[in-house]
Amino acid sequence: MFGQELKDFIHDYAYTAAWWAHAEGLPDENNRITLDSELKDSYGLPVARVTYEWGDNDVKLADAARDKAVEMMEASGARKVRIGLNYGAHAMGSCRMGDDPKTSVVNSYCQSHDIKNLFICDTSVFVTGSGVNPTLTAMAIADRSAQHIIQLAKRGGI
Amino acid sequence: MDEAPISLSDIAMLSHLANGIIPADDRDSGAASVHAGPSIAARMRFSPYADIYVTGLKAANDHVRTVFGKEVKALSPEQIHELLMHLSESTPAFFRQLRADVCALYLSDPGVWKRIGFPGASTELPEAKPLVVCWAMVVLSNLRCSRM
């Protein structure tokens, strides 16, 4: 959009309302972060390659949310409805938590299965993408991890 | 990007493109009211999107020369619109960045806020008052913290 259409859109701002639908993207083993085999950063190290594609359920969720939002807007008397699609905001997953080192990266205390003095305390340990903002959960997980580190350190466990 | 200075023709191109993105109408003179084109040209070299701008400007100049056969300042508003439509397809990264920068400059003008009705009562404050309000809020928050 540009030109007069864009300018009209900007000046309609005071009369604009928006729905924002939150939904959960289901985990998919094909969605992953790997080291790029070709592209290197300024230090000569391989950059991270993010591979991500929406699954069938993700697409259906987005479609349903979009249709319902349009229905509500029109029922509210909206004169013009614009549809946009946001592809997400919060990164989660890639170092998922679990008991089995074969299928997970960290244990329930965010401790790496492979490197015992490495604790990963952020949303990367989530086993699925949450449908809402993840910060409080990440803080709770980090707090639990910190308490565990204190106990381990007292026992000389790390 | 190379170290060559921004040329007058680049400033002219950016100005015409910016004014095509938010055109003049009976509300105001659009992007021209905030000098969006010259402002973008002045900071283009220091922008993280410098390469995108260089690529886009070349595409714009090529299109104007080969399709219209005249200088950008001689194009009609309809031809500028056609040029922008072409750039949105041929160099989408440039088009999107230019549009974002033009909108940001346009929306940085308190006069525009008033015309749009955003962000409300604060647009009525004289320039100095928001600083006083911020200072007062800092003092108050410090007082609150010191009592905790």
Image (spheres, coloured by chain):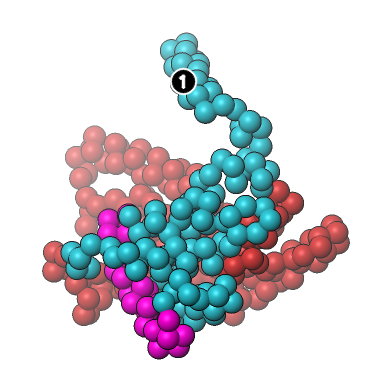
Image location of residue A141, percent across then percent down: 43, 46
Is-magenta flag for residue B64?
Answer: yes
Q: Is residue B136 above or below residue B6?
A: above
Of the 4 image quadrants, the one containing the N terminus of chain B is: bottom left
In the image, A107: left or right of B78?
left
Question: How many marks can you see?
Answer: 1
Image location of residue A41, percent across then percent down: 19, 67
Q: Is residue A113 visible?
A: no
Predominant SS of the magenta segment: helix
Look at 53% across and 23% down and name the residue there: B129
> Which one of the lettered chains is coloured red?
A
Q: Secondary structure at mark 1?
A: helix
Type of amino acid under label 1: Trp
Question: Residue pushed farthest left?
Answer: A44
Q: Is residue A114 above or below residue B35?
A: below
Image location of residue B83, percent across then percent down: 49, 78
| Among the 4 quarters of the image, the one containing residue A70 | bottom right
**Residue bearing mark 1:** B135
Image location of residue A11, percent across then percent down: 67, 54
Question: Residue pushed farthest bottom?
Answer: B66
What colour has chain B? cyan
Q: The disc numbered 1 marks a residue on which chain? A: B
Q: Is residue B46 visible?
A: yes
- The magenta-colored residue range is B43-70
Is-magenta flag for residue B85?
Answer: no
Between A87 and B22, the residue placed more toward the observer is: B22
In the image, A102: left or right of A62?
left
